[in-house]
Image (cartoon, helix red, strand yellow):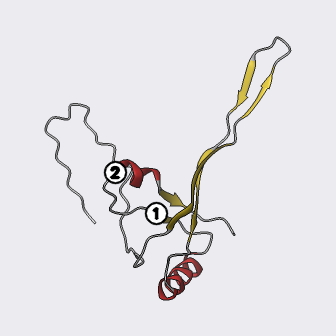
Amino acid sequence: MIIDIIDTNNFVGYIDCSRIVCGKYWEPSYNVSKNGLELTINDTTQTSRSDAGDLISDRGTIHEIITFNLEVINKTDKEQLISIMRYIGTYRNIAVSIIPSSNNNRDEQDYIIYGKRDNS
């Protein structure tokens, strides 16, 4: 795949394109239920105090967790989703957009995640 980006007003010399995800996609007939939809930002940084009282931070990782409910997805779509999850497993990355084609770009950006699923 080749993507040509031309920005004649860009004097920096590069374009940050970290949000491009290319490949096959699947979309159910109905999106997930908003009931139970939760976005958690997990920061594993540990903080402690020195003897002098200074706050010391041992920098950890920051990652997002999205929890969602599949109650409105029909049986055929659930079977397809389970098949995809079995194929991907826990070792491959996947992009999941909970609110695709949202009228509010912020909603779509907040509820899209790229990474690996945990074993649950």
Q: Secondary structure at mark 1?
A: loop
Residue with the mark numbered 1: 98
Viewport quadrant of the N terminus:
bottom left
- How crowded pointer 2 is (Cα within 10 Å; few <14, some 14-19, many 20+) is rated as few
Residue 87 x, y percent position in the rendering: 55, 81
Residue extending furthest toward the top: 52
Q: What label does residue 51 carry, if any?
A: none
Q: Residue at x 64, y 43 (%)?
A: 61
Residue 21 x, y percent position in the rendering: 38, 61
Residue 23: image quadrant is bottom left
Q: Residue at x 34, y 51 (%)?
A: 105
Residue 11 x, y percent position in the rendering: 21, 31
Viewer-proximal residue among 114 and 3: 114
Q: Earlier in the sequence, mark 2 or mark 1?
A: 1
Q: For the residues marked 2 and 1, what is the alpha-carbon distance in whole angstroms? A: 12 Å
User: Would you place residue 118 above or below residue 16 in this image?
Assistant: below
Judged left or right of residue 14, residue 32 is right
User: Would you place residue 93 above or below residue 41 in this image?
Assistant: below
Query: Given the image, on which type of amino acid does mark 1 rest?
Result: Ile
Residue extending furthest toward the right: 51
Q: Residue at x 16, y 47 (%)?
A: 6
Q: Residue at x 39, y 79 (%)?
A: 29
- Contact? badges 2 and 1 (CB < 8 Å): no
User: Would you place residue 78 above or below residue 110 in this image?
Assistant: below
Residue extending furthest toward the front: 35
Query: Given the image, on which type of amino acid does mark 2 rest?
Result: Asn
Residue with the mark numbered 2: 105
- How crowded pointer 1 is (Cα within 10 Å; few <14, some 14-19, many 20+) is rated as many
Q: Secondary structure at mark 2?
A: helix
